[in-house]
Image (cartoon, grey):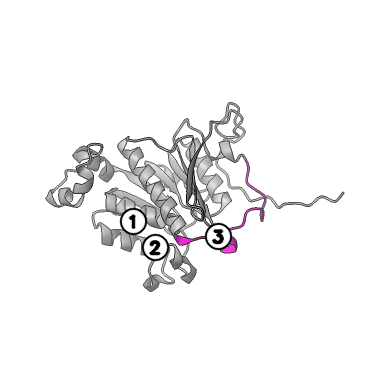
Amino acid sequence: MILDDNDILRYSRQIILKEVGGKGQEKLFNAKVLIVGAGGLGSPAGLYLAASGIGTVGIIDGDNVDLTNLQRQIIHFSSDLNKAKVESAEEKIKAINPKINVIKYKERLNAENIASTIKDFDFIIDGTDNFPAKFLINDACVLLKKPFSHAGILRFDGQTFTHIPGGACYRCIFPELPPKGVIPSCSEAGILGPVAGIIGSVQALETIKFILGIGNLLINRLFIMNAFEMNFRIVNFKKNKECPICGENPSIKEIKEYEQPVCELKRN
């Protein structure tokens, strides 16, 4: 891509950054980023990627817009109720930046389609809200050597880190899925909307920095926030030699889906 006069004006506030410049802006336009989930995290991430000039944005989500989504999923409006989320998201991305190429997948990401879906993208953003999906994305990205951004939100809390091939992965911190019911979902415990906005924006920021090859990424570092106390901290962690997928003797060698185990109570 060669920037025209309108592009130079549109992205002028980025181009004047010496870490970006014209060549960096061209890198962004030539990049392909996949957002998994057009929800609380994927909404701000998608909007900022489009505004920043990421040339191709893929969105995979099988759901339609529901009234309960509107409190935090800012890419969807009241007029979008019952519309496919991928359609709604594409409309807003195109409204912000008509040059963006949006690739839509109105389906759920699963073990059968994940490899073919992520293979042509440069970076993956995990905007999902359930553990089976997060472990699936982690495993596929590790096995296929794809960089990705993990994030999780609940109540007033959020966390995110960035994985690159060879670095620590999600299973280095959480080797196995937690038992069902141990950690509540957002629909059960609640989520403050701006928490999703902050963490999703950090994911977009990490994506842009990765594509440009600038700055200090959240590699082997977990960014944690608590909005109630307004605390932000970084927890450093290392690649786990015993990690079941990226360790020295991995036991996971193929992509498959997992179900959360049921927590069993043992009688004495």
Residue drawn at x 19%, y 52% as measured from the top left? 10
Query: Which element carries disc 3, helix, strand or loop?
Result: helix
Q: Is residue 6 visible to us here?
A: yes
> Seen from this angle, which residue lies furthest right?
268
Residue 87 is drawn in which quadrant? Answer: bottom left
Mark 1 = which residue? 47
**Tag 2 near tag 1, CB within 8 Å:** yes
Query: Which element carries disc 2, helix, strand or loop?
Result: loop
Residue stretch in magenta? 176-193
Q: Is residue 111 visible to us here?
A: no
Q: Amino acid at mark 1?
A: Leu
Q: Is residue 258 left or right of residue 265?
A: left
Q: CA distance from mark 1 to mark 3?
A: 22 Å
Sooner in the amino-acid sequence: mark 3 or mark 2? 2
> Seen from this angle, which residue lies furthest top?
248
Q: CA distance from mark 3 to mark 2?
A: 16 Å
Quadrant where the N terminus is found in the figure: top left
Specify whether residue 185 is painted magenta.
Answer: yes
Residue 13 in percent (x, y) is at: 21, 48
With respect to residue 254, does 51 lie above or below?
Answer: below
Crowd around label 2: few <14 · some 14–19 · many ≥20 (10 Å): many
Crowd around label 3: few <14 · some 14–19 · many ≥20 (10 Å): some
Q: Amino acid at mark 2?
A: Ile
Residue 130 in percent (x, y) is at: 56, 53
Q: Is residue 102 left or right of residue 147?
A: left
Mark 3 = which residue? 186
Mark 2 = which residue? 74
With respect to residue 146, does 56 lie above or below?
Answer: below
Sooner in the amino-acid sequence: mark 1 or mark 3? 1
Residue drawn at x 76%, y 51% as measured from the top left? 264
Q: Which residue occupies the foreground of this view, 106 or 77?
A: 77
